[in-house]
Amino acid sequence: MGWKVGLYLQIIFYCLAGVNHFWHASNYQQILPPWLPLQYPVVYFTGICEIFFGLLLIPKGTRKAAAWLITLLLIGIFPANIQMMLNSLHQHSSGTWLTVARLPIQGILIWWAYLYTKKRKVRLS
């Protein structure tokens, strides 16, 4: 995947994921750890962050900061991924394997964002 294609895919991915927080807020609320207060505001806030950080990837001047913010957001929402897996295990869901597979995918998403924290090296042909 080319550098620019990856960037555009990431922008689209985070903007759509953020919008999805508003379309399916109750789904996101269900995977938040029960100890977390103000769950719906958290769902909406993380959705806004995903949209905003995704859009911040567009200008070169804010791309590095956006990639770091996405990385921090992904780390911050990791407890929700764990909670989703625990919920699935508790419910003996047939989709538990997907929730387990999602945990290392978070690492891949962090790596993907990290790629855009660095200046792109220009190759001379």
Image: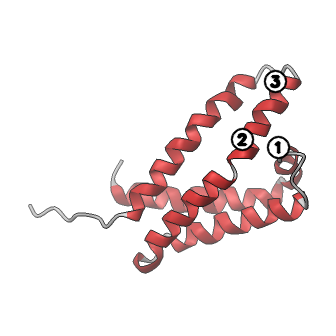
Q: Is residue 37 above or below residue 111?
A: below
- First reached walking from the N terminus: tag 2 or tag 1: 1
Spot occupied by residue 121 in the image (x, y as percentages of width and height): 23, 63
Q: Are marks 2 and 1 in contact (CB under 8 Å)?
A: yes
**Residue 31 circle label:** 1
Query: What amino acid is at disc 3?
Result: Leu
Q: Residue furthest front?
A: 35
Residue drawn at point x = 75 percent, y = 24 percent: 96
Q: Kindly identify which residue carries mark 2.
A: 81
Answer whether residue 58 is visible to the viewer in this image: no
Estimate the spatial distance between the alpha carbons at disc 3 and disc 1, rounded to whole Å: 13 Å
Q: Kindly identify which residue carries mark 3.
A: 89
Foreground pick, 22 / 37:
37
Query: What amino acid is at disc 2?
Result: Asn
Q: Disc 2 on helix, strand or loop?
A: helix
Q: Is residue 111 above or below residue 42?
A: above
Q: Residue furthest bottom?
A: 61
In the rendered structure, the answer to whether residue 89 lies left or right of residue 62 reads right
Please identify the quarter of the rendering in which residue 125 is found.
Answer: bottom left
Residue drawn at point x = 79 percent, y = 38 percent: 83
Answer whether residue 49 is visible to the viewer in this image: yes
The colouring scheme, among rainbow, by chain, secondary structure or one colour, is secondary structure
Query: What amino acid is at disc 1?
Result: Ile
Estimate the spatial distance between the alpha carbons at disc 2 and disc 1, rounded to whole Å: 7 Å
Q: Residues within 10 Å of mark 1 (few under 14, many from 20)?
A: some
Estimate the spatial distance between the alpha carbons at disc 2 and disc 3, rounded to whole Å: 12 Å
